[in-house]
């Protein structure tokens, strides 16, 4: 084997090892949180569910964010998305309009007046 071929093979081996190690590290990091005990895991942020939500679920999410009396809750369109609009007379003295996307449960908008 000549020097040029040996050097090329060694370089290729070093590159493959580096990328293989990075892929293994990425897999290890992805698996680590799942292996952690539930007591030490941080609670998930108030992320929207990835499924369609009901009007009752929208009301529950809205009143958790803005406690008060729900005056209306109905299907609406906001920012081009089908939403549940929930109107609340808040305990903070504001009148809230909160919109959750029906398809995903994501918060589309909220406005306090």
Image: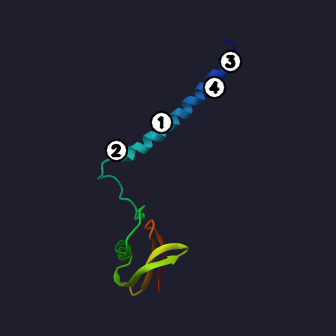
Question: Which tag, 4 or 1, sits closer to the chain's start?
Answer: 4
Nearest to the observer: residue 84 or residue 36:
84
Location of residue 42 in the rendering, given as x and y in whole percent from the top left corner: 36, 56
1 and 3 marks in contact (CB < 8 Å): no
Q: Measured along the vertical axis of the image, is residue 13 above or below residue 51?
A: above
Q: Measured along the vertical axis of the image, is residue 20 above or below residue 37?
A: above
Judging from the image, what secondary structure is the residue with disc 2 in?
Answer: helix
Location of residue 83 in the rendering, given as x and y in whole percent from the top left corner: 46, 74
Question: How would you rate the neighbour count of disc 1 (Cα within 10 Å): few for under 14, some for 14-19, many for 20 or more?
Answer: few
Label for residue 24? 1
Question: Which tag, 2 or 1, sits closer to the chain's start?
Answer: 1
Q: CA distance from mark 2 to mark 4?
A: 36 Å
Q: CA distance from mark 2 to mark 1?
A: 16 Å
Location of residue 1 in the rendering, given as x and y in whole percent from the top left corner: 66, 12
- State left or right for residue 103 relative to residue 19: left
Quarter-of-image position of residue 2 = top right
Q: Measured along the vertical axis of the image, is residue 75 above or below residue 89?
A: above
**Residue holding disc 2:** 35
Residue at the image position 55 percent from the left and 29 percent from the top: 17
Judging from the image, what secondary structure is the residue with disc 1 in?
Answer: helix
Specify whether residue 86 is in view.
no
**Residue holding disc 3:** 5
């Amino acid at each position: 084997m000549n020097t040029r071929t040996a050097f090329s093979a060694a370089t290729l081996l070093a590159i493959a090892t580096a990328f293989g190690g990075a892929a293994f590290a990425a897999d290890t990091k992805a698996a680590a949180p799942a292996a952690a005990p539930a007591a030490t895991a941080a609670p998930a942020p108030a992320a929207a569910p990835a499924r369609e939500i009901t009007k009752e679920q929208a009301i529950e999410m809205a009143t958790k964010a803005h406690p008060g009396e729900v005056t209306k809750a109905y299907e609406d369109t906001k920012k081009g998305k089908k939403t549940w609009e929930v109107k609340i007379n808040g305990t903070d003295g504001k009148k809230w309009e909160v919109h959750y996307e029906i398809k995903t449960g994501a918060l589309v908008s909220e406005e306090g007046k």
